[in-house]
Image (cartoon, coloured by chain):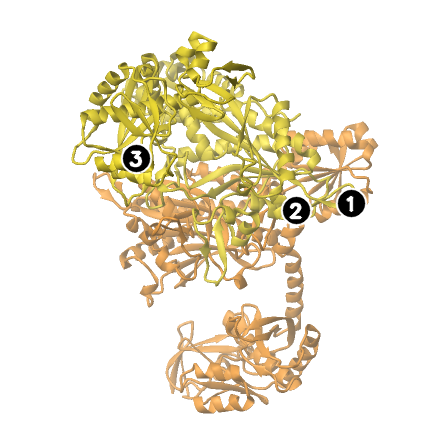
Chain colours: A yellow, B orange
Amino acid sequence: MIAITLPDGSVKQFKAGSTAMDVAKSISEGLARNVISAAFNKETVETSTPLTTDGSLILYTWSNDEGKQAFWHSSAHVLAQALEEIYPGIKLSIGPAIEKGFYYDVDFGEISFTEKDLAAVEKKMIEIARGKHEFSIRSSTKAEALDFYKKQGNEYKVELIENLEDGTITFCDHDSFTDLCRGGHIPNTGIIKAVKLTSIAGAYWRGDENNKQLTRIYGITFPKQKELTEYLALLEEAKKRDHRKLGKELQLYTFSQKVGQGLPLWLPKGAALRERLENFLKKAQKKAGYEMVITPHIGSKELYVTSGHYEKYGADSFQVIKTPNDGEEFMLKPMNCPHHCEIYKDSPWSYKDLPKRFAEFGTVYRYEQSGELHGLTRVRGFTQDDAHIFCTPDQLDAEFKKVIDLVLYVFGSLGFENFTTQVSIRDLSKPEKYIGDVNTWEKAEAAILSAVKDKGLDYIVETGEAAFYGPKLDFMVKDALGRSWQLGTIQVDYQLPERFELTYKGSDNELHQPVMIHRAPFGSMERFIAILLEHTGGNFPLWLMPEQVAILSLSEKYEKYAQKVLNLLENHEIRALVDNRNETIGKKIREAEMNKIPYMLILGEQEEKDGTISVRKHSEGDIGSMTVDDFGNMISEAIKNEIKEFNVD
Amino acid sequence: MIAITLPDGSVKQFKAGSTAMDVAKSISEGLARNVISAAFNKETVETSTPLTTDGSLILYTWSNDEGKQAFWHSSAHVLAQALEEIYPGIKLSIGPAIEKGFYYDVDFGEISFTEKDLAAVEKKMIEIARGKHEFSIRSSTKAEALDFYKKQGNEYKVELIENLEDGTITFCDHDSFTDLCRGGHIPNTGIIKAVKLTSIAGAYWRGDENNKQLTRIYGITFPKQKELTEYLALLEEAKKRDHRKLGKELQLYTFSQKVGQGLPLWLPKGAALRERLENFLKKAQKKAGYEMVITPHIGSKELYVTSGHYEKYGADSFQVIKTPNDGEEFMLKPMNCPHHCEIYKDSPWSYKDLPKRFAEFGTVYRYEQSGELHGLTRVRGFTQDDAHIFCTPDQLDAEFKKVIDLVLYVFGSLGFENFTTQVSIRDLSKPEKYIGDVNTWEKAEAAILSAVKDKGLDYIVETGEAAFYGPKLDFMVKDALGRSWQLGTIQVDYQLPERFELTYKGSDNELHQPVMIHRAPFGSMERFIAILLEHTGGNFPLWLMPEQVAILSLSEKYEKYAQKVLNLLENHEIRALVDNRNETIGKKIREAEMNKIPYMLILGEQEEKDGTISVRKHSEGDIGSMTVDDFGNMISEAIKNEIKEFNVD
C-alpha cells in the first residue's frame, strides 16, 4: 500500500501501482471524467502512470493551467500524426504547448504547404481524436532513439536526442504514432472535441537564422465546441482592438525604420493623450507628497557599475557610448533609479526630512531583439512613470501602503476594475541571481506581504520572480476581453541605498541607511496606452479622448455658428473639431463614429436659430437637442464622475 | 602719393610712407589722441606702419572691439615684460587678448608664483606703462628667431617658430622687451592707465594634458581708472549672480561626477521651474497652432547619415551605440529635426494641411570637452524648446514672421526687453562648409532678411555664421549687467526636406518639397534658466518663483492659523511655504530674504484675531496688513501684469 497526500492535506491509502486516474475515480466519477493530467511529488506524470511510492498528488482539469497545457501538448501529437498521415515523409522537429494552444515546426521538404491546407489537417485531427487513443510513455536508450530517427532521416530529432542524456529519453505512443516526448498527456485523444489550426509561419530551426526555415503550424483545441466558438469570437474582437491597428487609425503613434525599430514616435494626438495621463498622475502625486525631478538619459558606466546594472545587463544590452576622450564611457539609462540615488546623495538628510519621494517620467532604453518587439507593448525605448521613495525602515510599511492606494486610484480612474496582484520573491535555491544579503531580503519580502494583506488585495506569491535587487509587488489587470496584463509595480530595495552609500541622520544623531521603494503605477506609458487601447477598443474614458466632440454642420452655410459653438466648448475646456466640409451629414457622422469621437453635435438652420445643438452619442445615437452650455455642463459632470480627486489620508 | 579710402567712402591723398596715425592727425587732433589701432585693406597694421600703396583704412578707438583687442594684446606684452623683469629666467609661451582682457601662459620653472604675487606685477606694469614706450614690429628670419629663443632655452617659443613659415615671422619690441608677435598694437604703453590681474590658473601647453602645465595669468586693462572700477564692480555683481552659485543656493539643479560631467540633474525646485516655463510656452504654442510630439533620444546611424549630422559631427561627438546585433548602430540625438522629419513623412500631406508645426521639448546630447563645460550654459545634455514648421514656399515669409512674434512674446514675458538680432549667412568663400545648393541658400537668406526688416528688428548680418544646413536668425539679449547672451534661434532649412525626400501635394496635384523652419525661443532650457538666473539674480518674475510666499509665524502657537493661510493661498494657486519653527521672526525673515522669496506673511495673535496677515515684500520691507483674499488678488493681478496672453493675429 502507498499513502497519497491530496492538495487539501488529506491522506489516502492505495495499492502500489495505482494511477492518478484510479485516485480520481476513488474520489468521484465526475472528477475522473474531468481529470486530464496530474503531478506526483511536483513532477508531471501521466494519469496512467503507476504510482509506487508514498507521495503528494495533484489532479488537474481543464480549469487549471496545467490541465490546459497537457491538453494542448497532447493535441500537438495529434497534429503531428495527422500531418504524417497526409504528408508521409515530412520531418517533425518540435511541437510544444504554448500559452494559448500549441504549434509544431515541420520540415515539409519539397511539399508546398499553405493556409489552404489547414482545413484538411483539422478534419484529420478530429478523426484521430474520435478514436479515443490512449497516450503511453515508453523509455528508450539513446542508441535506440537515434537509430529510430536516423532511419527516418530526421536530422532534427537526431540533434535533439544527441543533446539528451542516456537514461532520460522517453517516447510517447498513441494510435499508430510515436514521438520523442517527456510526457504529460491527457488520458486519451477522445476528449479533444474542437480543433482550430490558426495560422502558419516560418520559423528557423532552433531560432537561428543560419539554420533551415521550417513551417510552424499554430493551433488550438478545446474539450467543447462552444469554447472554440467563444475563443474565435474573442480572437476576432482582439484583432479589432489590436493597439497597433487602433494606434494607426487614431493617429496616436508611428514607427520609422530610419529612427529604429521599437522606438515609438508619438504623433500629436498620442503625445497629447500621454500628456493628459501624465498630468493626471502628476496631480495625484503632488497631493501624495511627491516631488518631480529631471535626469539625463545617459549616465557614466561607473554609475551602472555602482548600481549593479552593468554587471546584470552587459552583452545583451545597448553597448557603451564612447567619447573622443579615451576611457570615458557612458550608457543609455535602462532605469532611473541610479540617477535618483545621486539626487538623494546631493544633500544631507535628517530623519525629519524623510520620506523623500522623487518622481520622474523618465524615458529609459533597453535592448530587445527585433523579433521580440511588438507595437507599444514591447519596445526599446519607453517612459516609466517612475518614482523612488527614500524612507526610514520605520516608514516602510506606511509608505508601501500609500503607494498601493495611489496605484488603486490610477486603476480606478482608468476603468481597470478587475485585477490581481503578485508578490515576487526570491528563489532560495538560486542565490546567485540576486544581489544583497539574505537578511535585508527577508525584511523586504515581509514588508510587502504585510502591506498586501493589510490592504486586502487578491494576491499570489511567485517564487523566483523577484528583481535582482529586491522583491516586488506587481499588479495584473484583466482587460475587457479577459486577458491579463502586468501593469503597475512596487518594489522594495535595500540594495541600492547600500551600493550608493545613502544615509540620513537619525534621531540618535547617527547615520543610517534609508530604504528605497521603486514604483510605477502605469509601468510604462507606452505599454499602458497600448493596453488601454485594447481594453477600451479606443473608446477611452471621456477625459482622455483626443477629440471629445465633433461639430458637424449640415452645410457649409453654418460655418460661423459652428465656430461659435467651438469657442463656447473651449470655454468649457472641451476638445472639439469642426467638420464643415461639403459632405452629407451621414458621411460626417459615419467618419466621426469611426474615429470613436464620443459626442457629435449636429447643427443647421433650426439649431442656429434656437442657439442649440443636436447631440448624438457615439454608438448610441441621438440624445436630444440642448444649449451648448447645458452640453458643456453635462460633459464636465460626466468627466467628474470618471475621475475623482485623489485623497490622501 | 597714395590714395587712402576711409570708412565713410571719402578718399584722401597722402605721401607714400604716411602712417595710420598721420591719417588720424590729418582728420583731427581728438581722433589722433583716441586712435589705438588700425586695419589697412582689412589687414591689421600698427598705427606706426608706413603705408605705401593705395588702400582702405579703418581707424579703431577704445569704443571698437578691434581697438580693445589691440589694447589688451599690447597689455599682454607689458605683463610679460613686467614678469621677466621681476622673475628673470622664466619662459614665456603665448599671451593673447581674449573677450575681456588677456592672459599669458608662463613656465615659472622652480619659482613659486601665487595670487599674492599679482599686486607687485600690476605695480611693475603701471611703471612700464607710464614710460610711454612705443611698440615696433620687426621682421626676422626663421633661423634668427630660433636662435634667439634657443639661446634663452625657451622651448615653447622654439616650438611655435618651428611651425611658422620663414618670411612670415615678426617680433615686436617695446622698451627693453621683445616678443614673437604678429602685430596689432596700440601706439604706446602710455595709454594703459589701469591694470588688474584678475586670477591665475593652470594651463597645459597647447591645451594637451600630456604636456607641461604652465601658469596662466589673467588680466584686464583700461584707458581710464574709472572704467576699471566699474568693471570690477560689475565682476563682483556677476559673481553674486553666477548661476552656478545661485543654482546651488536655490536648490535648482546639481551635477554628479558619477552620472557624468555636463549632465544636469534637476532638483525638485528646478524641475518645477522648468515645467512652469515649458507650460508657459506650450500654452502660447497651442494658440499659435503648434502640435506637440514626442520622439526618442536615439536614432539609427542611418537617420543621421540621411540628415547629414553623421558626416558633420563624427569623431568629436558621442560615439555610436552598438547593439548585440552585428552592424546595428544607434546614436544619441544631437538634434530633434531628423525625428520630426520622419514624423512628417509618416503621412501624406496636401498643401491644405500645411503648415504643420511639430513642437517638442526634446533633450539632445552633444559632446563637449570637459574643459569647456560651464554650469548650465555649456552642457553635454540639454533640452531644446524645439519646433519644426513644414510649410509651402509661399507660406515661408508669413510663418517666419509668426515665429518672430512668438519669440518676442517669450522675451517680453521674461523681462528681456533689451536685445539685438543677428542674421547668420554663408561665407561664400567656403562652400565646403555647407550642404545644399546655392539657389536654395539664396532664397532662404532673402526670406530671413525680409522678415527681419518687416518686423523692424535691430539686426546685424554675420557672414560665415550660418548653420551647415541653412541660414538663421539669432536673438542676443542683454542682461541686467549689460552682458550679451545668444538665446532664441530661427533657422530656415531647404536641405533636410530634400535629404528626407519630404513632399506635399500642391493645388496642381503634383508633389512639391516643403520648406522647414527650425526654431527655439528659449534655445535650451538649461542655458535659458542659467541666463535668467544671472539676469534676475535669482529674483525671477513672480509667476516663475519656486516659492512665491513664506508664511512666518511669530510663534509655534499660530501653526493652525498658518496652515489656514496656506490653504487659502492654495485656492489662489499661490505657492507658499510655512515656517513655523521655534525661531525668532528676525531669523525667519532673514532666511526668507536670502532665499529670495518675494513675499513674507507674518502672523501672530493680532493677525489671527483679525483674520489678516502682515505683508513684507522681498528687499522692500513692510507693505501693510490685509486679508488673505486681498493678498491673493494682489498677487494674481501682479502675475497678470507680468505675463500677458499670447495673441495670434
* Above or below: residue B507 compared with residue B37: above
Residue type (three-letter) at the residue carrying disc 1: Asn
Q: Which residue is mark 1?
A: A509
Q: Are marks 3 and 2 in contact (CB under 8 Å)?
A: no
Tag nearer the camera, 3 or 1: 3
Lower position in the chain sequence, tag 1 or tag 2: 2
> In the depicted view, which residue is nearer to us: A441 or A6?
A6
How many other residues sit within 10 Å of disc 1, few (<14), some (14-19) or many (≥20)? few
Mark 3 and mark 2 lie on one chain; the one further toward the N terminus is 3
Q: Earlier in the sequence, mark 3 or mark 1?
A: 3
Q: Which residue in the structure is indicated by mark 2?
A: A502
Q: Judging from the image, what secondary structure is the residue with disc 2 in? A: loop
Label 3 vs label 2: CA separation? 59 Å
Q: Which residue is mark 3?
A: A145
Residue B168 percent location from the top left of the image: 41, 84
Do badges 3 and 2 share one subunit? yes
* Tags 3 and 1 touching, CB below 8 Å: no
- Which element type, helix, strand or loop, lies under badge 1? loop
Note whether B328 is above or below A446 in the view shown: below
Q: Amino acid at mark 3?
A: Ala
